[in-house]
Amino acid sequence: MVIAIDGPAGAGKSTVAKLLAQKLGISYLDTGAMYRALTVKAIRSKVDLENGKALAKLATESQIQLRPTATGLNIFLDGEDVSEEIRTVEVTNKTFYIARAPEVREIMVNLQRAIGHKQSIVAEGRDIGTVVFPNATKKFYLDADPAERARRRMKEMQEKGKIVDEQELLREINERDQKDFTRKVGPLKKADDAIVIDSSGLNVEQSVAKIMEFLK
């Protein structure tokens, strides 16, 4: 069984997917974390983010592992836990370059499909229902108002002790949406057979409850 959850940045995909996987008793696959981990390595290695072939070579030389925990996943890059580092602003802003490289996406999609063929999963990302698992058991598109997404991101960062500007976050979210919607490879798009869940004004439990209603 593959449950696909797509949607824009800040819509709550990761948190919702984690809780949904727990309730269903199956694995959770954070595809975005895989691209973020490779971004970390590209930054460290000073690889040209515009060079698709160099990025693909880096991907083939990297070991990215998603290890389940009681609260979700820990992300390991070549044996090192980078769960915190992949969420930094620099990595967030540069992951776009990795995700749009056709050579990299081919490698990542094959890895993701291999995971989905071995076990039942809840997978979330940008193109899960359209590209990675077009024949998923059930597809959802989790959305939320950009202003709401900016507020959530601000709260998340403030809880980590960071000072942030809400308007700047909103600008970054709108800019990221534009990049995700218009990239040539694996753009953010709602699958024709996906069920839209608007999480604006909903907490995580309420969003998961709505999805569970359709799964029943």
Image: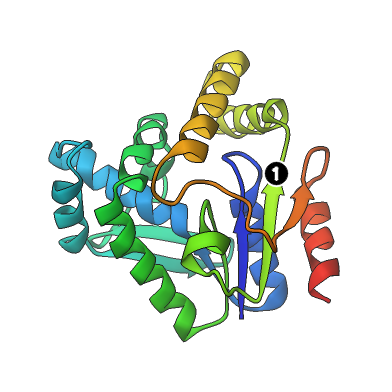
At horizontal 42% and vertical 30% (from top left) the residue drawn is 89
Residue situated in front as seen by the camera: 193 or 27: 193
Q: Secondary structure at mark 1?
A: strand
Report the side of 130 relative to 34 (left or right): right
Report the side of 144 relative to 93 (left or right): right
Query: Residue 62, image x and y in percent?
Result: 20, 60
Residue 168 image-quadrant placement: top right
Quadrant containing the C terminus in the rendered view: bottom right
Q: Is residue 186 visible?
A: yes
At horizontal 32% and vertical 38% (from top left) the residue drawn is 97
Query: Residue 41, image x and y in percent?
Result: 22, 47
At horizontal 42% and vertical 53% (from top left) the residue drawn is 33
Neighbours of disc 1 within 10 Å: few (<14), some (14-19), many (20+): many
Q: Amino acid at mark 1?
A: Asp
Query: Residue 95, image x and y in percent?
Result: 36, 40
Depicted 122 relative to depicted 197: above or below: below
**Which residue in the structure is indicated by mark 1?**
143
Residue situated in front as seen by the camera: 75 or 181: 181
* Figure coloring: rainbow
Q: Residue furthest bottom?
A: 118
Depicted 72 relative to depicted 87: above or below: below
Quadrant containing the N terminus in the rendered view: bottom right
Depicted 185 relative to depicted 111: above or below: above
Query: Residue 115, image x and y in percent?
Result: 43, 76
Report the side of 141 relative to 206 (left or right): left
Q: Is residue 72 visible?
A: no
- Give the number of callouts: 1
